[in-house]
Amino acid sequence: MQLTESTWQDAQRMPDDGNRYEAIGGILHVTAAPRWRHQVISKRLLMRLSELLEDPGHGEVAATPGVEFPATGEGVQPDILFVSNERRPIVEEAGLVGAPDLVVEVLSPSTAERDRGVKRRLYERQGVREYWIVDPSENQVDVYRFGPGAGEGPALKLEPERFRRLLPVRLGDTQVGSIDLSTIFAPGFGDAPR
């Protein structure tokens, strides 16, 4: 019996049941809805990225959109992404068709291995310029910079830059600001004793 590979179109046909469905390398990945702390950290990052990238008019920041890579039939739902004005044509009503400039994934115990492995390689291969892996358990962010020629050759940096205090926000090679990670990882309602 021949098994068929899953595509982004297959993931889009899955039930609206609160789970995230992604197709990477022909495999359908299912992830449960994120927990409270994950969502709080995502919201805080989204707000700061909006202030630094969207408000000045560099492009748009969005939470959990669908991203399709049509050449390979793959598709994912990252936690946050940024699309610069230069890459605006990839934005469609249903989501993105092509690589955004920045992708941010906030780790969960069930997604950490995939985010650090298969998704990192997918983003590099598909031309994402920068990829942030946000680790709430370690209060740190690993930043991979794949460069403008991502997907066409070796990565700009093979090892990530690790940030625990100030996280630089860049537009290409230009730093447009920074994020104080103590404000991102500060305890929220879900962390406070009752």
Image (cartoon, rainbow, N blue to C red):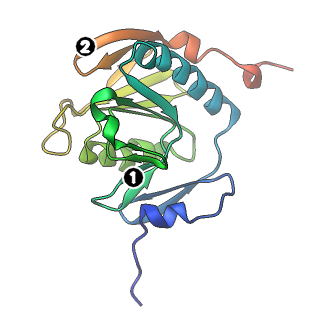
Q: Can you name the residue that lies furthest to the left here?
A: 153
- Asked whether, in this view, residue 90 is left or right of residue 125, the answer is right
Residue 1 in picture, x, y percent from top left: 42, 90
How would you rate the neighbour count of disc 1 (Cα within 10 Å): few for under 14, some for 14-19, many for 20 or more?
A: many
Q: What element carries label 1?
A: strand
The answer to whether residue 108 is left or right of residue 169 is right
The outermost residue toward the bottom is 1
Viewer-closest of 2 and 44 = 44
Distance from label 2 to label 1 (Cα)? 27 Å
Label 1 belongs to which residue? Answer: 68
- Quadrant showing the C terminus: top right
Q: Decide if residue 160 is in sight here.
A: no
Residue visible at 39% across and 72% down? 5
Image side of residue 37 versus residue 142, left or right:
right
Horizontally, residue 75 falls left or right of residue 108, namely left
Counting residues from the start of the chain, the first of labels 2 and 1 encountered is 1
For the point 43% across and 69% down, the residue is 6
Residue identified by numbered label 2: 174
Residue 22 appears anywhere in the view: yes
Vertical position of residue 163 compared to residue 147: above or below = above
Q: What element carries label 2?
A: strand
Which residue appears at 29% of the width and 38% of the height?
A: 128
- On the image, the x and y values in percent for residue 163 come to 40, 17
Q: Which amino acid does label 1 sit on?
A: Glu
The quadrant where residue 162 appears: top left
Front residue of 16 and 118: 16
For the point 43% across and 24% down, which residue is it?
141
**Kind of residue indicated by mark 2:** Thr
